[in-house]
Amino acid sequence: MINLKLVDILKALSDENRIKIIKMLACCDMCVCDICDNLNLSQPAVSHHLKILSDAGILNTQRKGKWIFYSINRDTFDYLQNEITKLLEKPIECPYKMYDCNCIE
């Protein structure tokens, strides 16, 4: 069965600007204004990317006065690492048929 949480996380990470945001937030927590300045993107564009990352559980938010600061949810990346490791594990018995198509003849 496909793990939908894993799919959502991978979809959220499938954008160059969102990867850049993750790299920035690996250094320190940031507000939207700081991310906009560093990426040279508009505030609506950055907010769109932050929403996608937040909805996938990749980011945490913390309100400080009138500002919202974003940080990486380390638990999600631990989960992602574990799920990718499980994807690459070889099963004891392969449940898939092999050489069952006509293209090999």
Image: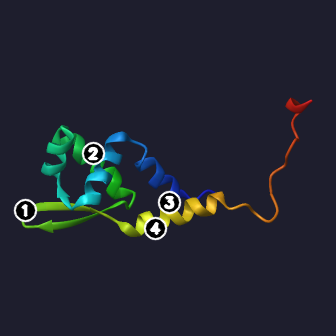
Residue 22 percent coordinates (x, y): 32, 53
Residue 85 percent coordinates (x, y): 59, 62
> Which residue carries the number 2 mark?
48
> Which residue carries the number 3 mark?
5
Does label 4 or label 2 sit earlier along the sequence? Answer: 2
Q: Secondary structure at mark 1?
A: loop
Quarter of the picture holding the C terminus: top right
Evaluate if marks 3 and 1 touch, with contact meaning CB atoms under 8 Å apart: no
Evaluate if marks 1 and 2 touch, with contact meaning CB atoms under 8 Å apart: no
Does label 4 or label 1 sit earlier along the sequence? Answer: 1
Residue ranking furthest to the right: 105
Tell me, for residue 78, which label it has, or none.
Answer: 4
**Amino acid type, callout 2:** His
Q: Secondary structure at mark 2?
A: helix
Count residues near mark 2 (Cα–Cα under 10 Å), then give few for <14, some for 14-19, many for 20+: few
Tell me, for residue 66, which label it has, or none.
Answer: 1
Give the left or right position of residue 4, taking residue 49 as reference: right
Q: Nearer the viewer, residue 59 or 89?
A: 89
Which of discs 4 and 1 lies nearer the camera? The answer is: 4
**Amino acid type, callout 1:** Lys
Count residues near mark 1 (Cα–Cα under 10 Å), then give few for <14, some for 14-19, many for 20+: few
Count residues near mark 3 (Cα–Cα under 10 Å), then give few for <14, some for 14-19, many for 20+: some
Residue 52 percent coordinates (x, y): 34, 50
**Amino acid type, callout 4:** Asp
**Amino acid type, callout 3:** Lys
